[in-house]
Amino acid sequence: MMLPNFEKARVLVVGDVMLDRYWFGEVSRISPEAPVPVVHVSKTEERPGGAANVARNAAALGAQVSLLSVAGMDEAGDSLARLLQSENVAVVLHRDAGLDTTIKLRVVGRQQQLLRIDFETTPGHEVLLNKLNDFERMLKDADVVILSDYGKGGLKHIVQMIALARAAGKPVLVDPKGEDYARYRGASLLTPNRGEFRQVAGGWQDDAELTSKAESLRRELDLDALLVTRSEEGMTLYRAGEALHEPALAREVYDVSGAGDTVIATLATMLAVGADYAEAVHVANVAAGIVVGKLGTAVVQREELAAQL
């Protein structure tokens, strides 16, 4: 299929942002202090993570992307704002002096992740309330909304956000977290991965049981559709009375971190230009197949996607 032109697609991303830091180095010995590898760091890198990675994925496809989130008044928050601007994301970042910007620091040796260290705090109520006012304002200029929930507290008002977006006739795509899916009621589409779906719906023996559980959750939450991403089993879209399966694209899997961000960003960008769910899921599946071949939170460029399609 031909990839649509995304220049007119207007995507609003709201959620938990973080800074992904990578320390790359060589491992040539074990520490004399404890039985752990010693990493001699030779290169460091920073990338936008969480909802910020979703935003940069949509921007890499050529969409007009706005991002609304909360960050600390710290060096990591400055880095995030700078990185996002360089990737053509229009960012509204509420800075809170009482908040540490979430950082995920990954130590990588010999192309293997050896350790991840997380720094995070929960944002204050006042900052989040201000964010809701901005959401109402920014909603007017969006074709589709992504709510990227990483469970860091940045989406306290998600129930109101879904209601406002649906009242304005805008599709709302949610990447969920945790066990309380009731707060996502009324969204257009939910995109849990296999583990997240199992956490909420319980296990299943076969595809028929999975379909039954997915349809039951879809009806209970009043969703248009539910997309379960299933790693090596591909992804399945559940709508009223139908299950549409996209098999995983066989290629070397290097790193699955951030693949869900690429999927929801691609879905939203496709829906913003008028594609139907089946087309959007097909293209998102191809994008996922590309991004898992890259290290860390990465993006898929429009040209790469067009070539694969």
Image: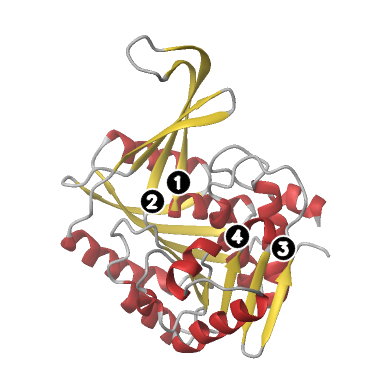
Number of other residues with Cα within 10 Å of mark 3, as a class: few under 14, some 14 to 19, many 20 or more? many
Do residues under tags 3 and 4 come within 8 Å of each other at their CB atoms? no
Picture quarter with the N terminus: bottom right
Q: What element does badge 1 sit on?
A: strand
Could one spot residue 288 in this view of the protein? yes
Q: CA distance from mark 4 to mark 1?
A: 14 Å
Q: Residue at x 73, y 42 (%)?
A: 252
Q: Mark 3 or 4 closer to N-term? A: 4
Do residues under tags 2 and 1 come within 8 Å of each other at their CB atoms? yes
Q: Mark 1 or 3 closer to N-term? A: 1
Q: Mark 2 or 1 closer to N-term? A: 2
Q: The residue under label 1 is which amino acid type?
A: Gly
Check disc 4 and report the residue beneath it.
263
Picture quarter with the C terminus: bottom right
Number of other residues with Cα within 10 Å of mark 4, as a class: few under 14, some 14 to 19, many 20 or more? many
**Image height of 264 relative to 32, above or below:** below
Q: The residue under label 2 is which amino acid type?
A: Val
Number of other residues with Cα within 10 Å of mark 1, as a class: few under 14, some 14 to 19, many 20 or more? many
**Image height of 160 relative to 22, above or below:** below
Q: CA distance from mark 1 to mark 3?
A: 22 Å
Q: Quadrant of residue 115?
A: top left
